[in-house]
Image (cartoon, rainbow, N blue to C red):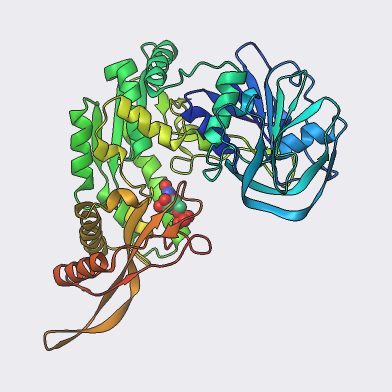
């Protein structure tokens, strides 16, 4: 495997994803909590950082167990660190070095740059530049403005790179990373979805033996893939619980429950619509809604799980980005994000936790799902928030409002699917606004509800942009909604990006 030492760059996870796309397994660790370099570690990559190596409080890891002893690649800050602290010099850049640049010197005899073309486009993003390299360091690539775009330490397998090979705009970045992890480090490209399934199923068998496990299914990709993996490993010892909170999409509960049963999962569908709606009665505040839904979910799930004899484990669909210790820019303390969907469950239930997907990125979860033959309809689904339509009904929630919004959402989502737009959108949905507006239908004046449609592109939900859906499509959907859904006389389309807006309206 490859170890990526994280200095807090926004691109660190991207390095890991690129390396894994080459089918080489890698892990991210904070620079101040470096794992032991045993024989399974074939090489190390140092990430970029929001710090400058000239800052007093800049990360300064001890690399004695690594540098000169195994392949090492410094990216951006990593490259500057390997210069500055080994006798070179780093200075603030005189010209702006952000964005697109082209290499104009490439030493293709260097193993790192094999098969990289002369004028390869690379992506720069740094405020410092290496002005002097330590002795024994040799330049292997330059751009017009950046003389030291890449270097090698002559007597070591140590490399540095000022640009970011991991970003999309470094067009041959993947080739360079492949040259490093396969060529220099000698990793075999055997981290594939199939091999993941095979090893994980075996590990789960060893870990769980004949124990009983309970898993909450949500209809989302992560819990579904976790369920199928566990089912492969322990079969009927896995019980899945799928709760209908009454806030799902139209017909969703029945349809998803049906596909789970078709996949052979031992799944209990719990109709808890009434509990959720009555607890939410009269509540308008978004955070209070979320808390109530979280609490009722735990109560319903817990009651159901207690009906199963001798359960020892709670399985969760936690994925890698939720467990990576991220280096905080505000100090070296490491923070771990908790899984926001099921926070609170393990503590209350007194069960051991098993998380079969906690090494995977989202796109890998999909690929693993595909390798196990899970239906594309389930794997390609848009994300849907745990609190469901409750946070898309602004203001208080009633059964009538839920039913109305389900109809609107259904017309919109089905429209996207029918027009081959669904897969181009990362997430889409409809919001019911707490306003009424005047309209006219036939000869009648109406005074009815407004719905907002939202469709965004994103990679992880952290940032998002609104989708430029075709006007004709929007016109058709708007018309259908107003004609078919009683109580709605106006449709608006949300054209805000995140930030400053968020994806959901609450
Ligand atoms: P925002 O609205 O924060 O949403 O831009 C980002 C992503 O998170 C989803 N979301 C939630 N998911 N529980 C969830 O499980 C929640 O309380 C919640 N709030 C937002 C949202 O749908 C989007 O994908």
Please identify the residue farthest to the left as the structure is shown.
442
- Residue 66 picture quarter: top right
Residue 120 vs 349, above or below: the answer is below
Q: Quadrant of residue 277?
A: bottom left
The location of residue 415, given as percent across then percent down, is 21, 58
Q: Position of residue 470 (x, y in %)?
A: 29, 64
Q: Position of residue 298 (x, y in %)?
A: 40, 41
* Quarter placement of the N terminus: top right
- What residue is shown at x 57% (from left), y 30% (from top)? 177
Please tell me whether residue 211 is drawn above or below residue 172 in the rendered image: above
Say whether residue 29 is left or right of residue 202: right
**Toward the viewer: 304 or 255?**
255
User: Which quadrant holds the C terminus?
Assistant: bottom left
Q: Residue at x 27, y 38 (%)?
A: 378
Image point (61%, 18%), residue name: 185
Residue 480, above or below 113: below
Task: Specify whether residue 503 is in view.
Answer: no
Taking the spot 32% from the left edge, 33% from the top edge, the residue there is 224
Q: In the image, is 337 to the left or to the right of 410?
A: right
């Amino acid at each position: 495997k490859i170890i990526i030492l994280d200095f807090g760059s926004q691109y660190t996870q991207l390095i890991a994803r690129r390396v894994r796309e080459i089918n080489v397994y890698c892990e991210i660790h904070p620079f101040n909590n470096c794992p032991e370099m045993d024989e399974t570690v074939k090489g190390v990559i140092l990430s970029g950082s929001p710090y400058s190596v000239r800052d007093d409080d800049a990360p300064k890891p001890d690399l004695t167990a690594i540098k000169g002893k195994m392949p090492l690649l410094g990216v951006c800050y990593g490259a500057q660190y390997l210069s500055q602290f080994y006798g070179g010099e780093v200075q603030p850049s005189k010209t702006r070095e952000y964005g697109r640049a082209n290499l104009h010197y490439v030493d293709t005899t260097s193993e790192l740059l094999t098969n990289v073309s002369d004028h390869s486009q690379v992506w720069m993003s740094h405020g410092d530049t290496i002005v002097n390299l330590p002795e024994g360091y040799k330049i292997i690539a330059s751009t017009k403005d950046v003389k030291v775009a890449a270097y090698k330490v002559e007597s070591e397998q140590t490399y540095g790179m000022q640009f970011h090979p991991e970003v999309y705009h470094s067009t041959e970045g993947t080739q360079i990373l492949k040259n490093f992890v396969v060529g220099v480090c000698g990793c075999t490209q055997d981290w594939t979805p199939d091999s993941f399934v095979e090893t994980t199923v075996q590990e789960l068998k060893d870990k769980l033996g004949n124990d009983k496990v309970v898993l909450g299914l949500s209809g989302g990709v992560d819990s579904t893939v976790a369920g199928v993996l566990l089912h492969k490993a322990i079969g009927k010892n896995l019980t899945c619980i799928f709760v209908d909170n009454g806030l799902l999409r139209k017909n969703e509960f029945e349809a998803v429950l049906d596909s789970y049963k078709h996949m052979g999962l031992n799944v209990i569908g719990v109709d808890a619509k009434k509990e959720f709606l009555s607890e939410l009665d009269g509540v308008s505040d978004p955070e209070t809604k979320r808390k109530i839904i979280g609490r009722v979910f735990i109560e319903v799930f817990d009651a159901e799980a207690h009906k199963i004899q001798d359960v020892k484990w709670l399985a969760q669909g936690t994925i890698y980005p939720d467990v990576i210790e991220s280096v905080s820019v505000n100090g070296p303390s490491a923070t771990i994000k908790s899984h926001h969907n099921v926070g609170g469950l393990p503590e209350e239930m007194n069960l051991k936790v098993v998380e079969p997907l906690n090494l995977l990125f989202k796109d890998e979860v999909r690929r693993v799902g595909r390798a196990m033959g899970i239906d594309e309809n389930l794997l390609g689904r848009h994300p849907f928030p745990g609190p469901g339509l409750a946070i898309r009904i602004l203001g208080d929630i009633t059964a009538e409002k839920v039913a109305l919004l389900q109809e609107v959402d259904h017309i919109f989502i089905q429209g996207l699917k029918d027009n081959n737009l669904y897969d181009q959108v990362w997430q889409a949905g409809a919001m019911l606004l707490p306003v009424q507006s005047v309209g006219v239908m036939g000869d009648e004046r109406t005074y009815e509800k407004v719905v907002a449609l939202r469709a965004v592109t994103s990679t992880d939900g952290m940032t998002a942009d609104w989708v430029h859906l075709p006007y004709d499509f929007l016109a058709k959907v708007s018309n259908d909604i107003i004609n078919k859904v009683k109580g709605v006389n106006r449709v608006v389309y949300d054209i805000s990006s995140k930030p400053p807006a968020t994806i959901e309206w609450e």
